[in-house]
Amino acid sequence: MTTTGRRALLAAGAAAGATALVGCTSGGEGPRRPGAAEREAERVARAEAALRARSVTVARGLLEHYDAVLSAHPALAPRLTPLRRSVAAHVRALGEGGTGPVKPAAASPTPSASARPTTASPAPIPVATDPGTALRELAAAERTSSDGHADALLAAPPEYARLLASVAASGAVHAYLLTEGART
């Protein structure tokens, strides 16, 4: 057999194989209904997307709290800026993987439009006029956020649960640094 003959034979075989595959997958019965495994996978994906959305919302709320305290008490910037950067990184990390675009938070200690969600923001966060009280309130917000992430661990898939555990632990450390850590 010549080279041209082999090529023609291979092309004809490939065309016949493709036709057979199309025939196997396209039934004349109308649209194919998803099986139980596909429905379960879709349910799990929706649940994970909702969990991610809630986790990002909690982290963004905490980031907004940092922005409010920094706006009301600019003298706290050296102390709060590293913690705020960490929270902004948590917002980005928690949002990866399916909840749509998560806008990165600005690294500056002042509030910025890029750190805000694209939806309408709730009422501004009230901040105490006393810096010490404002720090204690921010520490309480960190603890609440940390507890929320820890509670979400039970429903999270393994990889996301590890991330949530890390973010929850970080929040606990931030709360310590905002209160007890200042005394040492």
Image (spheres, rainbow, N blue to C red):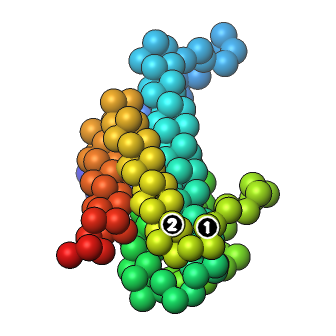
Displayed quadrant of residue 26: top right
Q: What element carries label 2?
A: helix
Q: Which mark is residue 164?
A: none
Left or right placement of residue 155 versus residue 15 in this view = left
Instruction: Provide residue 116's location: percent of width, then percent of height.
Output: 66, 67
Q: Residue 128 carries which label?
A: 1
Nearest the viewer among 94 and 23 is 94
Mark 2 or mark 1: which comes first in sequence?
A: 1
Q: How far apart are marks 2 and 1 (CA)?
A: 6 Å
Identify the residue at image location x=49%, y=38%. Answer: 51
Residue 113 appears anywhere in the view: yes
Identify the residue at image location x=39%, y=73%. Answer: 83
Residue position marked by numbered label 2 in the rendering: 133
Q: Mark 1: few, some, or many residues within 10 Å (few <14, many ≥20)? A: some
Instruction: Name the amino acid, label 1.
Output: Ala
Q: Mark 2: few, some, or many residues within 10 Å (few <14, many ≥20)? A: few
Instruction: Provide residue 140's location: percent of width, then percent of height.
Output: 45, 54
Q: In which quarter of the image is the C terminus?
A: bottom left
Nearest the viewer among 149 and 37 is 149
Identify the residue at image location x=53%, y=68%. Answer: 134
Displayed quadrant of residue 176: bottom left
Instruction: Provide residue 64's location: percent of width, then percent of height.
Output: 60, 65
Instruction: Provide residue 13's location: percent of width, then percent of height.
Output: 39, 39
Identify the residue at image location x=40%, y=82%. Answer: 79
Q: Do the residues labelled 2 and 1 touch (CB within 8 Å)?
A: yes
Residue 49 appears anywhere in the view: no
